Image: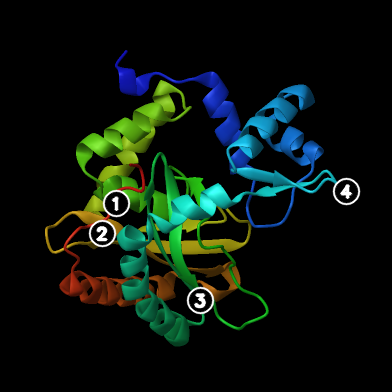
Amino acid sequence: MSESDRHVESVLSALAVLDCFESDEPLRLKDFHARTGLTRSRIIRLAGTLMHKGYLTQDKETSQYRLGPTLFRLSTLLSDRFGSLSARVRPTLVELVASTGLTAMFSVVGGRDRLILTKEEPDQAVRYTVKEGQQRAIHLGASGRVLLAFSRPSLASDILDSLSLSEGAKAALYRDLEPIREKGFDLSESELTRHAFAVAVPVLANTGELQGALTLAGPTLDYSRDKLEHLVALLNEKSKILERGGTKKPVQSAQT
């Protein structure tokens, strides 16, 4: 086993505590327990360590935990890498929302997951809702599979090998990526969110490397097979515009 494949269990547990947050809303001890399965005594020790380094803060009156200022400091270090890409993509997402009435998002590879870098949503009461900065399993959903299919083969292989799947499931996933590369898009229906669909295409840099996945998503009542061809064509049109804009440093992964 290489050094990069070794794990420190206590560090993984501490990161699992941080991964419990989906927003800036505070969490209780029982929330961490429910989301990680860790014992309460271990969570308290981990939380104490994270608080000591500023990754968490705690309200003494309510005993609730919030994300700490150290995470904000670290996030600012990524502004050059992701901020310019997000700013360049956002106008395209706004155009996609205006022309389709669907939610538009741009995702990148984030370590071993998919990171939703930028999103725009329509004003409709019934819509597909996501959060910027949200991470999702990369092997699930159209956006994630597009990222895997069009990533560098070595990166895709490393990610797939790291997934907690049976060898049969990994082999099936490997096979599923080839038709996605051939078609140039992927579709998911009621996979990650019930009664919702998503269609995604890759966005490449002017070097040919993957920048991310451009996605339209919405409730299944806004989807039909006849509409799919139009959505794919629209996404491809916008992805080509983004590709022509290019970036000097294509974003392959959020992992440093």
* Residue identified by numbered label 4: 61
Label 2 crowd bin: few (<14), some (14–19), many (20+), radius 10 Å: some
Q: Amino acid at mark 4?
A: Glu
Q: Assign a secondary structure to mark 4.
A: loop
Residue positioned 58% across, 68% down in the render: 128
Q: Which mark is residue 180?
A: 1
Which marked residue is nearer to the observer: mark 4 or mark 3? 4
Q: How far apart are the alpha carbons under marks 4 and 2?
A: 53 Å
Between the residue at mark 1 and the residue at mark 4, the CA separation in whole angstroms equals 52 Å
Q: Which residue is label 3 attached to?
A: 102
Q: Are marks 1 and 4 in contact (CB under 8 Å)?
A: no
Q: Secondary structure at mark 1?
A: helix
Of badges 3 and 1, the one in the foreground is: 3
Amino acid under label 1?
Ile
| Amino acid type at image mark 3 | Leu
Q: Residue furthest right?
A: 61
Q: Secondary structure at mark 3?
A: loop
Q: Which residue: 28% across, 76% down?
A: 238
62 versus 221 height, above or below: above
Between the C-alphas of marks 2 and 3, the distance is: 20 Å
